[in-house]
Amino acid sequence: MNTIATPLFNRVAFIGIGLIGSSLSRVMRRDGLAGHITVTARTQETLDTVVRLELADNVTVDPVEAVRDADLVMICTPLGAYASVAQTVGPHIKAGTIVSDVGSAKNCVFRDIAPHLADGVHLVPGHPVAGTENSGPEHGFAELFRDRFCIITPGPDADADAVARITTMWHAANMEVESMDAEHHDKVLAITSHLPQLIAYTIVDTAAQLGTDLKQEVIKYSAGGFRDFTRIAASDPTMWRDIYLENREAVLDILGRFDEDLTNLKRAIRQGDGDTMQDVFTRTRAIRRGIIDAKQHTPEDQKS
Amino acid sequence: MNTIATPLFNRVAFIGIGLIGSSLSRVMRRDGLAGHITVTARTQETLDTVVRLELADNVTVDPVEAVRDADLVMICTPLGAYASVAQTVGPHIKAGTIVSDVGSAKNCVFRDIAPHLADGVHLVPGHPVAGTENSGPEHGFAELFRDRFCIITPGPDADADAVARITTMWHAANMEVESMDAEHHDKVLAITSHLPQLIAYTIVDTAAQLGTDLKQEVIKYSAGGFRDFTRIAASDPTMWRDIYLENREAVLDILGRFDEDLTNLKRAIRQGDGDTMQDVFTRTRAIRRGIIDAKQHTPEDQKS
């Protein structure tokens, strides 16, 4: 537990608060990073949850009220809401304020948010690479971020102090912070996150369209591998829809490569070509070893 | 721990002993199911491991010696070895002996093993639906099977007593035993296990073919979802090659459906059709709920 004597931010406004936002607010409260936290959300139900869980000092359905006097505006909505949120609150954010986010695509931040910010407002987009298949503020927890990477994508003219403060914030959440170009981020995440998620959705949907009897048996015998995909495919539909809409190019590019590789394996199966299969199935092990060496696995991975 | 006073089988022969076979031998020794266990394997290295781990009373490189006088012959090799194993040992298995296996495809047992067995030898194919990404006898553990399903696929003329004894054996391993037609088994498992595994191999292979720099970053940021696939794709290459060779038809059928579904999602992304995505991503949640209701999840699933 890091306790910082002076709050890192006097007043923080969360716009939208789901799994990630609520986990960050818990970190802020645990470590005293914020002097005051205001949360705004679209529904009163979400705000009631925030009040019940004591995640904020103040809640409001009015985003303009939320951002007034804020030193940090954290946008934690699905990506599809960025443009309209920025349009609404942009004119009311004072100079010197930092605006950041937690979305899984970063090019769109510069396209949808940046144009609505006044000069002197500091944009530092961020993406904590962490999550679970659960969504909503009630599922957040401060330890969600521990030992994961947070990728920040400040533009070339970003304010150095703002970048340093966002970095300090994620360090407090026990994340390792890396900085990269937004476009490069979107390409890397298309491979590590967006494609796997799409494939999981597809395979579970293929099963969902089976006849009732066969579907029941698929559920019954899901421990054979399918179960892992259903966990991934239980993630928030709106969040993911927006990711594919916003990171379309990079996703379609890697999907094209995946398609080619799948076609090759399909041909090997059809032709009874065991050597090709053995080659592919062997070289994939090297990637796993790389991940274990890079410590990007969990205790659960090792156990199971 | 069930302790059975009289051994269920006087003499058991394991032909091949990897993760599954060694886990079963541990159950047998824990519960006294076998009066005597002989293990045969292709390599002296495997047999040395079996001796070191005290998984058998006797080891031999000669499969014919192993099956002589056995009451139960458990074939635990990859599927591709079934035909040659059966051809070698078939003539030496005495009447009254039960022959079973643990393979992930079951039609091929009747094609590759049955023709080599004498009248009076009882074939009861089985498939304990359990496993980890690790292979080899050193990774086995008796609790591997707990609360999982074992599917047995006895033919229409199977010996009732033999079926009962194989069922008792898997019950001792704390499995729930279900009986079904071999062809139906192969269709269900193509969906729940063989397709997910193939997809995991493909996606990890797509990443394996990236340029070095990008590949290093994919490994670094793998926590975003990709990591789950690498664990699955670290499984034994030979075992899986044989599964695709032996269950070709059912796998190609479900792969065709998966391809169609992926093409639909790809089109939705390209066209910016958020409604189609939202529909698919929402209905996949129902399958997950079904699995949670059917208790086919693990404590790790809930935690993460």
Image (cartoon, coloured by chain):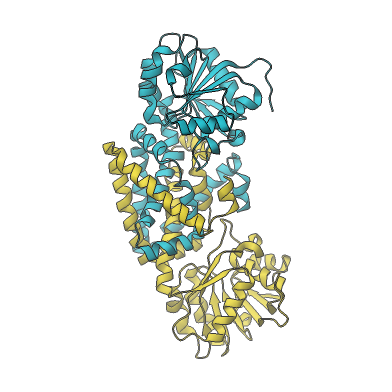
Chain colours: A cyan, B yellow
Can you say which quadrant of the picture contains the N terminus of chain A?
Answer: top right
A279 to A296, vertically: above or below: below
**Residue B273, percent from left and from top:** 28, 38
Q: Going by the image, does A135 lie left or right of B13?
A: left
Residue at the spot 46% in from the left edge and 10% down from the top edge = A94
Residue at the spot 39% in from the left edge and 25% down from the top edge = A82
Q: Going by the image, does A35 lie left or right of A204?
A: right
Asked whether A18 or A177 is in front, the reply is A18
**Residue B299, percent from left and from top:** 60, 52
Residue furthest to the left in view is B271
Where residue B142 sits, quadrant-wise, is: bottom right
**Residue A62, percent from left and from top:** 43, 21
Q: Going by the image, does A264 lie left or right of B17?
A: left
Residue at the spot 40% in from the left edge and 15% down from the top edge = A90
**Residue A249, percent from left and from top:** 33, 34
Q: Is residue B209 visible?
A: yes
In the rendered picture of this protein, how many numbered marks are placed on residues? Answer: 0
Can you say which quadrant of the picture contains the C terminus of chain A?
Answer: bottom right
B200 to A46, vertically: above or below: below
Residue at the spot 42% in from the left edge and 65% down from the top edge = B188
B149 to B132, vertically: above or below: below
Q: Is residue A128 visible?
A: no
